[in-house]
Amino acid sequence: MSDAQKQPQNAPKKQNDNLKLPTREQDFSKWYIEVISRAKLADNSDVRGSMVIRPNGYAIWENMQRVLDGMFKDTGHQNAYFPLLIPESYLAKEAKHVADFAPQVAVVTHAGGKALPEGERYVIRPTSETIINRSFTNWVQSYRDLPILINQWANVMRWEMRPRLFLRTTEFLWQEGHTCHASEAEATEETLRMLDVYERFAEDYMAMPVIKGQKTESEKFPGAVNTYSIEAMMQDKKALQAGTSHMLGQNFAKMFDTMYQSKEGKKEYVWQTSWGVSTRLIGALIMTHSDDAGLVVPPKLAPLQVVIIIIGKTPEERGPVREKAHAMAADLKKAGVRVLVDDDETKGPGFKYAEYELRGACLRVDMGPKDLAKNEVTLARRDTRSKETIQVESTVARCHELLEQMQKDLFEKAKAFRAANTHEVNTVEELKAKADDGFLLMHWDGTPETEKRFKEEFGVTTRNRPFDLKQEPGKCVLTGNPSTGRIVFAKAY
């Protein structure tokens, strides 16, 4: 019997009970909030609708940011930074843009102890198309200046009526890409390229399968010609929009006279795109993979991939174990693994097991004096909770194997869940029965009036029209009018 098997009850039962969560089946919303709180990812702040991102949560965002930033640079983009405050007059230049963002905008009306004149007020950026376009106007003179491929890592503010940690907060962190091109074709290519980047990040790093497609006219970004999205299914079968890429056409260029001289010597408006993902991805990650024991994080993004638990009752027992644990941790770090040695003597193994399950450590290595006497350690996986005993010298290689397998298994599990909860719906009766059951592939007549009825009468909204869904004519589920093809509907965050 290993030391880990021999001493699972060292922690007081009461302590372990304090770590228990409500189950997903009992109350998914409460479970989600409790995972965030108990895993120490974020707290509500005293600023309405805003959050404090704690180190464990911010470490996930840093890993996401690091990967995405590399992907952006690999596609030719450069980082820049633009002001937080935007002249209020800029938003008024584009009617659709200002109309849709007006309810969410925070306006600075006083500065330096004095009221600002009407024409000199500022808004705190809800997005940066307008302020960035002002710079683009100054930067672009000739076709030789194009394309401009810019990304900004920043915070934005949108006055949120119904805040929820990570999913909808008044202030949140994100990246926003903004580009200028000489032709419509180049801008369209860029829009779809960045959607592909988001899809690859979601599936390869977040282990979260997504549906890639075009948003409807009523769901597109204010001021855009077309909006494309990736949509994911959470464990409560609701949809979450995980990223968007917008073909802006020449709308903002015309607002700010962003023009270039073509090879033929003509003055032309540039074609533009914008695209972004935010800390909402952390919420998506939680709701895609976590379980009733706490946070589950795909290894590629996990702040803590391996935790080594030192087991031993006396200093004499713990000393040699500690030495071996730190040597093992050094080897894991050299191999690129994010690892922590837990030598806290105030908590027993049982409490630590529950604590690291809650925090989302991918693998746990249990090491005690009897284990070392046999040159063994016990490895436990967070997602499956499976355990195995291996030789000490095999630890680094086996950790790599298990982390790679866990990444794959999480994706396949989420993909199977989505497949099991995606349904073709052809009648109103089927819609009533399936409205809460995931992604619904339905015919719709394409009118905003019918789209509104779907939402008001059944609580489902259009997510996108998938690129890979074969489109065949049919009849709208609600009106019976002709439909050009099916689109994804779902209840959504």
Image: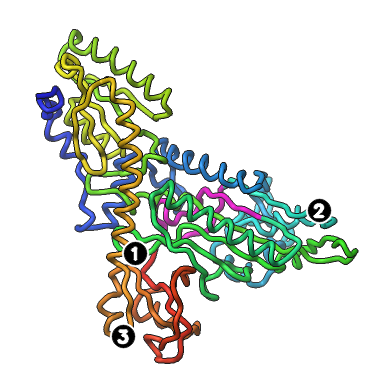
Alpha carbon of mark 2 to alpha carbon of mark 3: how far?
Answer: 54 Å
Quadrant of residue 251 within the rendered picture: bottom right
Specify start and end residues of the magenta stretch as a single range.
155-178
x, y percent for residue 134: 75, 56
Which one is nearer the viewer's eye here, 235 or 128? 235
- What residue do we see at 37% from left, 20% from top? 331
Callout 3–callout 1 Cβ contact below 8 Å: no
Placement of 250 over or under 342, stated as above or below: below
Residue 238 is marked as 1
- Specify how the rendered protein is coloured: rainbow
Residue 138 is marked as 2
Placement of 448 over or under 315, stated as above or below: below
Callout 2–callout 1 Cβ contact below 8 Å: no
x, y percent for residue 332: 37, 24
Which one is nearer the viewer's eye here, 477 or 166? 477
x, y percent for residue 386: 19, 39
Residue density around tag 2, few if under 14, some if 14–19, many if 20 or more, within 10 Å: few
Question: SS at mark 3?
Answer: helix
Regarding residue 93, the answer to whether it shows in the image is: no
Which one is nearer the viewer's eye here, 36 or 111? 36
- What residue do we see at 40% from left, 60% from top? 232
Query: Which residue is the site of mark 3?
Result: 428
Question: SS at mark 2?
Answer: helix
Quadrant of residue 53 within the rendered picture: top left
